[in-house]
Image: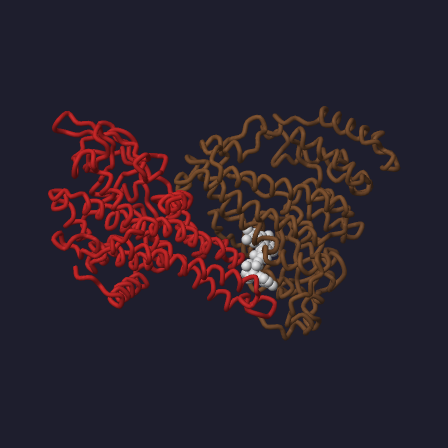
Chain colours: A brown, B red
Amino acid sequence: MSEASGDNPASVSNDAIRDEVQSWLADNWDPEAMKKGAFGPLGRDWTAKVVDAAWAATRWPKQWYGRDYNDAQARIVETEFARVGAPGTGQDRINLWANTVLTFGNEQFKKKYVPALLKSEINMCLLYSEPGAGSDLAGLRTRAERDGDEWVVNGQKVWTSGAATADYGMLVARTDWESPKHGGISFFFCPMKQPGVEVRPLRQITNESHFNEVFLTDVRIPATNLLGPLNGGWRVLQTALAYERSMMGEGARGPRSGAKGASEKGEEELIALAREAGRLSDPVLRQDIARVIAYKKLNALNTARAKAELEQGTSSPIMSLGKLAMSRILHEEAKLRTNLLDAGSLLESSDYPRAEDANFLTLNAYFTSIGGGTDQIQRNIIGERVLGLPKEPEVDRDVPFRSVRSS
Amino acid sequence: MPELDDSERNELQNTVARLLADRSSESDVRKTMETETGFDPALWQLLAEMGIVGLLIDEQFGGYGAGAMEIERVMEEVGAALLCSPLLASAVLAASVLGASGDDDAQRRLLPDMAKGTSIATIALTGTEGSWTPEGVAVRAESNGTDWTLSGTASFVIHGQNADVVLVVANTEQGTALFQVEPSELGTAIRALPTFDHTLRLAEIEFAATKAQLIGEDGNGWPAVEQGLNLTRVALAGEQAGGARRVLDMTVEYAKNRVQFGRAIGSFQAIKHMAADLLLESESATSAARHAAMSLASTSDDAEPAISLAGFACADAFSAVTAASIQMHGGIGFTWEHPAHLYLRRARADAQLFGTPMFYRERYIQQLGG
Ligand SMILES: Cc1cc2nc3c(=O)[nH]c(=O)nc-3n(C[C@H](O)[C@H](O)[C@H](O)COP(=O)(O)OP(=O)(O)OC[C@H]3O[C@@H](n4cnc5c(N)ncnc54)[C@H](O)[C@@H]3O)c2cc1C
């Protein structure tokens, strides 16, 4: 390993880190090649390079592709990557799959999957929600039963993003029906490419089909793919959810029209859009633009501060705050983009890219305000787990799951 | 037509509600919105037979001579059922502008078939800016003394692609005037626009020295257009109020039945309070729309601000209710198969047609002397 990553990370100077990452990027990063697809499908070859050079998850231990960096050091790496527009780093913050496996997998399991997950060599999905268990995820009814060296799973999942292309799903299933609802759930790493897994695409309000219904019939999972303790899946889930929320709090899918942004010279996109629309001098819109840009800025600052205090493998309900903030940002930005267009927003299609963007973003904002736990649930979590306000009474919390009421 | 009293108006509304429950169900709407014309001719004919298409047209031209208060009620049901039709374009906007045009010949020529539903009319009013004001007019008319020709672009022409009668608002040397163009003169110059609200049809028309016939007086066309626009705004406010109410009902019903954490989600204050706030929005929309209709029908002094108030209160209510509805439904609300997004799309369209909430708020304060 290079000289900047001495044995004691604290002893590595910030300058040395910056120098090392800069020169590595100078030797390896080629944005044109990325654009042309020279780094393979989805830029996977690039990601692999980043992982092999230990830049993908610098806060992680060295034996797991990391550098034992503290948050400040890791930020330097991320800043340098961002400066040249290179993806692939910061996965210790946002790769929910790799983080969950690293935290809860055994040695052998981690060896097998952590690098593949970091390198995006396998596609993943989240098999959590069910028709009767969305916000109330602990009410899930998909069952897993032990059969020799395997688990056999039966049930139905829904709203499963990416299930159609997934190689594995992170699955929560009930393994004990006598315990209260949270106590009988286990967390599995479920192979998707097998006969018992039937994926039916659902059409979304965006007119896309990313999420699916998934029917599980005698699906078989090797016993070694249990993550965390048997019946201790709820805690694993909390960690995975925190990473997911943290990811969703940092960003969301942008416009899909593929049109060139309005912004040249790195000006704020919303300001550029307003200028393009001839509305930049409208005092009302100026207030709104300032507000939305500020929401984004403040969320970024909050997030950076919250995460600086977080250790790998720990999770914090504070992540709910970022996700809630992002939801507001997305809905407000979509409103603003609509107001900039006025009647232009009546249209859609790639012939009207600004309208297409405003309308798509209006709809897709619900991805963040519903997916990953709704805004209402985030507010409950913030109220109860961050602020310590008393919980709402939950009628079915402490009764054996068998006798719980469902829709 | 003799003035209807309130119970007769209720009866009118109920009749329309029953028809639309039968013929404009959600699955009908989904089927119709995917067709090219975007409306169901058989249902259109039924609406004509019931007198809805001719509701605002004078009795001497085969209509019912009703007014703002009646059409507002009808439109509440249109919004609730998401009816796909040229009703607003033909039976409301075009019919009322023609009615106000003072051009007896044109009225005699056009209104009877419009009342019967056998011809569909629309008005090309705004340019690509999409502002339904005199400044928004982007078509120029020229005359060689006897014949008129039009040039320029009109956009957001509602059901333009389906119209047999195309009325055009254009600027002349004298000011603003109303014209009629034969669709056969237009050919490919009329182009369907792709709309985010799939229940709506819009077109753009490119005029290039297109032959046109003057309706009414040259230079004095705007007052009739404004009069028609005002009635149309009231009708649209009714649609928004009715749409908001239906979506709220649907959402409350869901909140009563969907169980999470062992209880109906409507028992959570987060959901309950949202619903209560939305009821305030929706009731305010109905009040605003009906008040605007009454003020316009009685030609009261405060008709103008009442219409502006309805313009933004109803648009904002419909938008707020539809937006919250998706959230309150959770994942199911994010699916194409659920109707919530159809209403959201309609609400977004309605919030643009004939003026945005920002436009109406500004007009409102000006009308109040501010
Ligand atoms: C675009 C998208 C992608 C998704 N991707 C995935 C995925 O990949 N994998 C996966 O497992 N799931 C996924 N989901 C599912 C998502 O996590 C659930 O939709 C969400 O948790 C809500 O559950 P629900 O749909 O059952 O709604 P419900 O839980 O029925 O909620 C309905 C309404 O009730 C409110 N509510 C419920 N409980 C309470 C309460 N206690 N207090 C206050 N309000 C409450 C909710 O906020 C909501 O407004 C996705 C959803 C969307 C929209």
Ligand 1 visible in quadrant = bottom right
Measured from the top left, where is residue A289 in percent x and y?
Answer: 53, 39
Measured from the top left, where is residue A155 in percent x and y?
Answer: 60, 63
At 33% across and 52% down in the image, what residue appears? B32
Quadrant containing the C terminus of chain A is bottom right
Q: How many marks?
A: 0
Q: Is residue A56 left or right of residue A396?
A: right
Identify the image quadrant of residue B288. bottom left
Measured from the top left, where is residue A76 in percent x and y?
Answer: 75, 33
Q: Is residue A1 visible?
A: no
Extreme residue toward the bottom, this view: A403
Quadrant containing the N terminus of chain A is top right
Measured from the top left, where is residue A22 in percent x and y?
Answer: 74, 27
Q: Judge whether B219 appears above or below B263 on screen.
A: above
> Between residues B307 and B82, which one lies in front from this camera angle?
B307
At 16% across and 59% down in the image, what residue appears? B1
Q: Judge whether A58 appears above or below A145 on screen.
A: above
Q: Is residue B128 visible?
A: yes
At 39% across and 47% down in the image, what residue appears? B351
Q: Is residue B234 left or right of residue B362?
A: left
Q: Judge whether B162 appears above or below A282 on screen.
A: below
Identify the image quadrant of residue A296. top right
